Amino acid sequence: MAEHPELLAEMPAVARLSTPERLKHAQKRRAQQLKKWAQTEKELQGMKGGAERERRRRKSNGQGKRVTFPASVWLLEAAARHDAEEVRQFLQSGVSPDLCNEDGLTALHQCCIDDYGDVVTVLLEAGADVNARDSELWTPLHAAATCGHLRLVQLLIRRGADLLAVNSDGNMPYDLCEDEVTLDCLETAMAEQGITQEKIEEARAATERDMVREIRRLVQTGADLDAPRGHGATLLHIAAANGYVEAAELLLAHRAGTDVRDEDGWQPLHAAAWWGQMGVSLAELLVAHGADLNGKSALDETPL
């Protein structure tokens, strides 16, 4: 997965891309992230043996102490090894099929990335949430569709996967699917469920509506609207990155800071620029409330 300096270096080139080209670029970056997650989980496969050896060593030394890992680690590690039987044993022992890692990635997400259909079946039969969301609001169907895993897409749809699930980038599973056969499967299922373009647009807008409701709730409780969230980003960073004008207006009306920086030194205007949300209304709104067009990030990059 690309590091932040690399992403910043790409900004001028990305800014010149057409909308379809930007989507493909975003898909490529996400695929790299998914592969990194998969590799990380697979690297955990040595943990179990190592922990057992350590337990035996300590026991032989009379210490009696055990090295333990969270149940989520064991479940994800077994799933990453494609060990359906061990996954089944964990689940039968009472381990929740929806345990996740720090990125919100569940075993079901992992197996949809790796195309481990038999493990997916075990997880679903144990009650795994077919619409579980990771930290970027990706569902297992987003992962399977992006990777072009047709059989898994079909299975997830049969089990009730939400075809209109919108991730943090505003994309539904069919938006991210490049494999023609898999895309045809998704579009056919959408047609069979009576999903029209109007419903698609309503679903996309629902994400911002949910955010607006959350902001109003925070305002009523007197919460800090500039409280850092993932990677130090505030609600205004999120609204700016997604082009949520109504949410941004509400935040700014209640004095959310335009100069608050995330962990990379980005202000909300940097986020808007990177994600191609520099439309007149949003940019003018931020600048009118004090956003600095010449503000520099940790790497001295400005929004322009």
Image: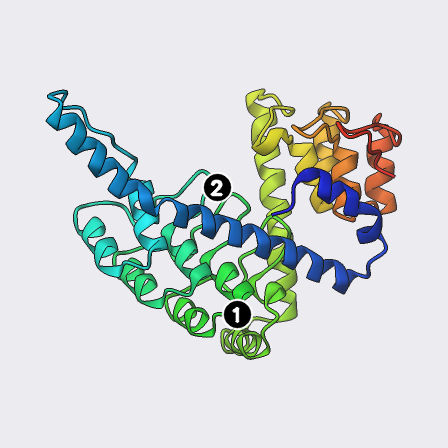
Q: Earlier in the sequence, mark 1 or mark 2?
A: 2
How far from the left and from the top, in percent, is residue 49? 25, 43
Pick whichever, 141 or 71, lies toward us.
71
- Asked whether the viewer can see residue 98, the reply is no
Amino acid carrying mark 1 in the image? Gly
Residue drawn at x 51%, y 43% is 135
Say above or below: 189 vs 1: below
* Image quadrant in which you'd find residue 263: top right
- Asked whether the viewer can see residue 7, the reply is yes
The circle drawn on residue 56 is none
Q: Is residue 57 left or right of residue 296?
A: left
Say above or below: 190 vs 82: below
How far from the left and from the top, in percent, is residue 94? 19, 45
How far from the left and from the top, in percent, is residue 34? 52, 53
List the residue tagged with mark 2.
103
Q: Is residue 223 left or right of residue 274?
A: left
Count of residue discs: 2
Amino acid carrying mark 2 in the image? Asp
Residue drawn at x 70%, y 46% is 242
List the residue tagged with mark 1.
148
| Residue at disc 2, secondary structure | loop
CA distance separating discs 1 and 2: 22 Å
